[in-house]
Image: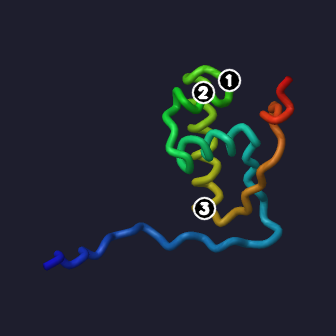
Amino acid sequence: MARPVKVRRISALPETYREGGPAVHLSYDEFECIRLIDYCGLSQAECGEQMEVARTTVALIYEHARKKIAESIVLGRQLEITGGKYRLADQDE
């Protein structure tokens, strides 16, 4: 028999998305880092190989991306993915 789920204590309910408020901007490289690590399950080293940057650079990109995503969720802000310094893989020569 499964144990009953214990009631969890939370500090507050999340903000709801408000149209027209300030947006949180996630760059394309931050998005790629989140995609590779959290969605695809790659390690930071593997992510670095895919993105052709050092693992330490991936760690910084990942930290910034997670903070921005958390800000978007906690404060109910729109998340915009745009910009940054990048090149598309299919444009490699």
Which quarter of the figure is the N terminus placed in? bottom left
Query: Can you give x and y, in whole percent of width and height, for residue 48 in the image?
Result: 60, 27
Closer to us: 27 or 22:
27
Q: Residue at x 25, y 76 (%)?
A: 5
Location of residue 83 by image quarter:
top right
Which quadrant of the view contains residue 78? Answer: bottom right
Instruction: Return the mark for residue 48.
Output: 2
> To which residue does mark 3 refer?
73
Q: CA distance from mark 1 to mark 3?
A: 29 Å
Q: Is residue 4 above or below residue 85?
A: below
Residue 87 left/right relative to 6: right
Q: Who comes first in sequence, dot 1 or dot 3?
A: 1
Q: Look at the numbered discs 1 and 3 and tell me whether their residues touch, using CB distance below 8 Å.
A: no
* Amino acid type shown at disc 1: Glu
First of labels 2, 3 by sequence position: 2
Residue at the image position 78 percent from the left and 65 percent from the top: 21
Mark 3 Cα within 10 Å, few/some/many (few <14, many 20+)?
Answer: some
User: Which of 53/68 is in front?
Assistant: 53
Determine the residue positioned at 54% across, 42% down.
37
| Mark in the foreground, 2 or 3 | 2
Quadrant occupied by the C terminus? top right
Residue where numbered disc 1 is placed: 52
The residue that appears at 54% across and 30% down in the rendered structure is 46
Three-letter code for the amino acid on which mark 2 is drawn: Gly
